[in-house]
Image (spheres, helix red, strand yellow):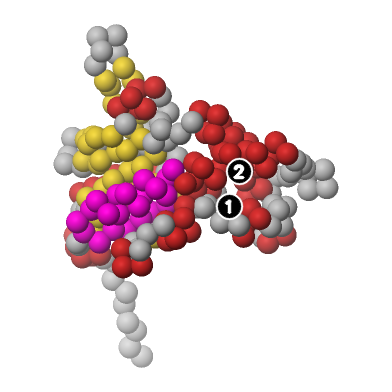
Amino acid sequence: MNQNKISTPSPEDCDSLLNISLDQRSLIIAANRGPVTLEKQSDGSIEFQRGSGGLVTALIGLAQHVEVRWIACPMTDADEEWHTGVVTLSEQVEQIRVQFLSPEKEAYERYYNVIANPLLWFLQHSMWDVPRAPIIDKETWQAWENGYVPINKNFADAIIENVYGVRRSPLVMIQDYHLYLVARLVRSGIKPSKRPTILHFIHIPWPGPEYWQILPPPCATRY
């Protein structure tokens, strides 16, 4: 009996397939954190420090194959002051245009430390003691309406601006639970002929529907 053997593709084959897949593409990444953080030195110079997370490691290699733009929130005062520009992330040719947003500090606090962490993070890890927590109260709604929603709109506006600014067909890669509203906001804010391909990657567990029912329906349906 004949048996078909499945051959493992070589690294060269993988590179060739990646080049074909990303040919004529511009990649726009949206994530809470950028691929670098900046620190101003005592002499006034700016030092770039590459992010150590797995997301950065996984994605920067794409810069060898495609134009990459990365949109993020600033982590330092130097990030916010620098705002946007091109950074080199290795000794190779990987260059990424990084754009740091300028969110209001109170809005960011509500978005990150009330909604994203801990509410969504605990929910997705099935860690809430459901009969007792979480308590969705006025403070939670204020954090949603005046934190999570406007920060997601900041990201969507920046993505739309970049979609219109690139020459090649854009591929938008949205990262994680911080940015659940972004895809819908981008689709509704851009004319159909310019709508990009949008992928949303979640890097934490995805619980069953019974856990998502913890959230009030407007959190899922209003936007």
Q: What stretch is highlighted in magenta?
A: 154-174
Most extreme residue toward the right is 131
**From where the camera sits, is residue 199 visible?**
no
Q: Residue 145 carries which label?
A: 2
Give x and y (percent) for residue 87.
Answer: 23, 34
Residue 2 appears left or right of 134: left
64 relative to 109, above or below = below
Q: Residue at x 69, y 57 (%)?
A: 217
Quadrant of the image for the N terminus? bottom left
Q: Name the side, left or right, on which 168 lies relative to 154.
A: left
Residue 14 drawn at (x, y percent)? 24, 61
Direction from residue 27 to residue 144 in the image, left or right: right
Helix, strand or loop at mark 2:
helix
Q: What's the CA distance linking mark 2 and mark 1? A: 25 Å
- How dense is the environment of label 1, judged by Cα within 10 Å: few (below 14), some, or many (20 and up)? few
Residue 206 covered by magenta stretch? no
Amino acid residing under circle 2 = Glu
Read off the residue under disc 1. Answer: 205
Is residue 89 in view?
yes
Count neighbours of disc 2 (C-alpha within 10 A) and say few if under 14, some if 14 to 19, many if 20 or more. some
Identify which amino acid the numbered label 1 is placed on: Pro
Which sits in the foreground, 140 or 134?
140
